[in-house]
Image (cartoon, rainbow, N blue to C red):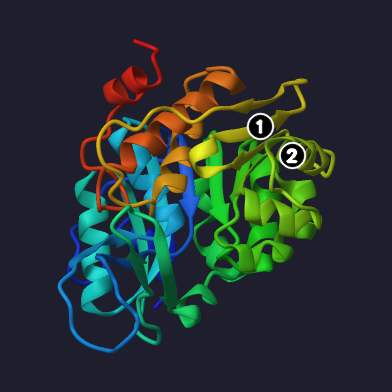
Amino acid sequence: MLCAPNCLEAAILKGCSQVKVDKRETKIVLIGPSHLDIIVKGDFKWEIAYSEWASIQPVSGGSVRNVAENLARLGINSTLLTITGEDIFGHFLCEQTKKVGVQVVASIDPSVRTPVYLALNGPDGQLLLDMLDGQDCHNRFSGSFGQTYIDYLANASFVVTSTDVNTDLFFYLADASLERGSRLLLQISAPSAASKAKNWLSKVDVLFLNAIEAGLLIGEETNTIEKNLRVAEKLLALGPEIVLITLGPDGACVASKAGHSEHVPALNVNGEIISTIGAGDAACAGLLYGLVNSYDVHTSVILGLAAAAITLNCIETVSPVINDTLIRKVALLS
């Protein structure tokens, strides 16, 4: 059921506590699905089918939701506009996200199931296989959803969404952001969604994606740092003010219309790499943290890489220890 803001007023329905949202203070509004992530780590042998021991961890997930949680842990006031099913997973996601300080506005839709994401990691943290269930929920992120919750975009410095939303909702958010003076960040959520965003770029202020997605979006190889820099500059010419391409262990390539284009090496990861799931979302949150706090693009990218490095040390999609002091320390800013 979709409830208008005046009957919901930032409520978490059926099983989640109500959260008072002050729209005047919200710096970042994020719109997208929430997932229950099941992260599995083990030394898998695929020759025969049999049961084996593995570490299995159910955690809150969803790219935009993960960015929202990271921002809350970094002390940035943010509001998450999301949709879940009327099921135990949806209630869990709302409650856990609210507990870390995100102001959650959830539409509980009994006709859909809350999306579930499954990821299998090898012993070195490398992603071996992942899959996602819940397309019916993703399809609910339409223009009418944006119209219902448009008031929450008031006074936001950034509006963040991903290719998980429908095209009509994206353009509705883009026009609303322009009208309100907000900057729009688009996160490409998966390589399979890259082509979907090609006609969206003229409306985007900040584009966040990985090298595979960038290559698919522009139709060129991105197998070297130099090629990623060229692709970033070509994407920049299509509309965004900032393009950030993450390169995993090679760091990131960034281009901006302020004339800044460079490769930024990854930061050292202290300790074991447990899982790579969520590291990109942490990098996106770190970038936003820097931009909201008026750091330049270069420093904001370093903060993003610091957040990613911290996240690699845990099985959760968002590090439970990340905070603004730690991210500055890892980024060598304090």
- Quadrant position of the C terminus in the picture: top left
Along the polypeptide, which appears first: circle 2 or circle 1? Answer: 2
Residue, disc 1 = 254
Q: Nearer the viewer, residue 229 or 82?
A: 229
Q: Which mark is residue 48?
A: none
Residue 131 position in % (x across, y down)? 43, 75
Residue 292 position in % (x across, y down)? 50, 26
Q: Nearer the viewer, residue 86 or 199?
A: 199
Asked whether, in this view, residue 253 is left or right of residue 99, the answer is right
How many discs mark residues in the rendered view? 2
Residue, disc 2 = 232
Q: Is residue 291 visible?
A: no
Using a 10 Å C-alpha cutoff, classify the residue at mark 1 as few (fewer than 14 neighbours), some (14 to 19) or many (20 or more).
Answer: many
Using a 10 Å C-alpha cutoff, classify the residue at mark 2 as few (fewer than 14 neighbours), some (14 to 19) or many (20 or more).
Answer: many
Q: Nearer the viewer, residue 154 or 85?
A: 85
Label 1 amino acid? Val
Real-space Cα distance between discs 2 and 1? Answer: 7 Å
